[in-house]
Image: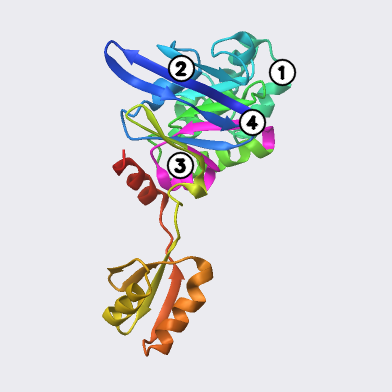
Amino acid sequence: MTLAIRSDGLSRRFGKLPAVEGLDLRVPEGTITAFLGPNGAGKTTTIRLLLGLLKPTSGTCEVLGHRPGQVEALRQLGAMVESPSLYGHLTGHENVEITRLMRGGARPETERVLKVVGLTRDAHRVVQQYSLGMRQRLAMALALFGSPRLLVLDEPTNGLDPAGIQEIRELIRQVPRQTGATVFLSSHILAEVEQIASNLVVIHRGRLRYQGPTADLGGQGAPWQQIRVDQADRAMELLRGSGLEVKYEDPYVLVQCSDEGVPALAAQLVSSGVALYELTPRRVSLETRFLDLLEGA
């Protein structure tokens, strides 16, 4: 597995205050990896370390096989950190052209990145007339300039309305398909992350709490099934008698049981005279799994 980001024991202190402690990050290339944690968890500090804007107190990290801040890394890296810096009195096209001239890129590159973010039609409007969502897309165009292998985004949907969030979400989802870039994004909007990120990194109080596939977060142990019956107390007694973990959340009886065990569970209830109206898997939201993980910290 080729890694876009790797760190070993990465730590950063501000005086005696630890902001990041002993992070061992492994971010595979070609993924959309979401970087999660509550406010003050150390997300922005970590991103600044990866971009070479801060130096670690201890530990090491690599971005695309290079130390952060090295020219070889910066050439292959695009980033959008906090609020985008744009020239409001200039057009979107002119904003991108400034970047092209500073970096010595070919003229078609300006048109390419504007097309990727869906701003071709509005490219010659002044940025002052752009909505916040359009400004975020223009900032993404600047980050995508030069076809970076890694795109680092710090809270890309911060402050956007639902329509703007959807625009940015769809754009982020398309980036790996259209450009082949790895996307590493911090966010606090868990419902959005669940729809686009294949992998997660979760930190809390500067320490790593989870990294791996989104679907696997909190997935240890058998899944839960929810059932609706005519005799909840009777059903719970029967299931507990079979050694299953059971709890009640009106109007459902929840039972921890693998999918393979569902037919036997249903047969047991029906054969015992319990009328079974519904039996479905209990889908636990990413938010619930995330909060459960932090509670154990």
Q: Which mark is residue 165?
A: 3
Percent position of residue 9, x then y: 45, 20
The mark nearer the N terminus, 2 or 3, is 2
Circle 4 is placed at which residue position?
181
Marks 2 and 3, Cα distance to the nearest angstrom? 27 Å
Q: Residue at x 29, y 77 (%)?
A: 237
Rendering coords of residue 53 (x, y %): 46, 12
* Horizontal relation, residue 194 to residue 67: left or right: left
Q: Is residue 255 a member of the stretch shown in magenta?
A: no
Q: Quadrant of the C terminus?
A: top left
Q: Nearer the viewer, residue 253 or 190?
A: 253
**Element type at mark 2:** helix
- Indicate the secondary structure of the residue bearing disc 3: helix
Q: Residues within 10 Å of mark 2 (few under 14, many from 20)?
A: many
* Amino acid at circle 2: Leu
Nearest the viewer among 206 and 190 is 206
Q: What is the span of residues highlighted in magenta in the rendered image?
A: 178-200
Q: In the drawing, does residue 118 fall left or right of residue 296?
A: right
- The residue that label 1 is drawn on is 107
Residue 124 image offset from top left, x and y in percent: 59, 26
Q: Are marks 2 and 1 in contact (CB under 8 Å)?
A: no
Could you give the CA–CA distance between mark 2 and mark 1, rounded to whole angstroms? 32 Å
Separation (CA) of disc 4 from disc 2:
20 Å
* Circle 2 residue: 49
Residue plotted at (60% across, 37% down): 31
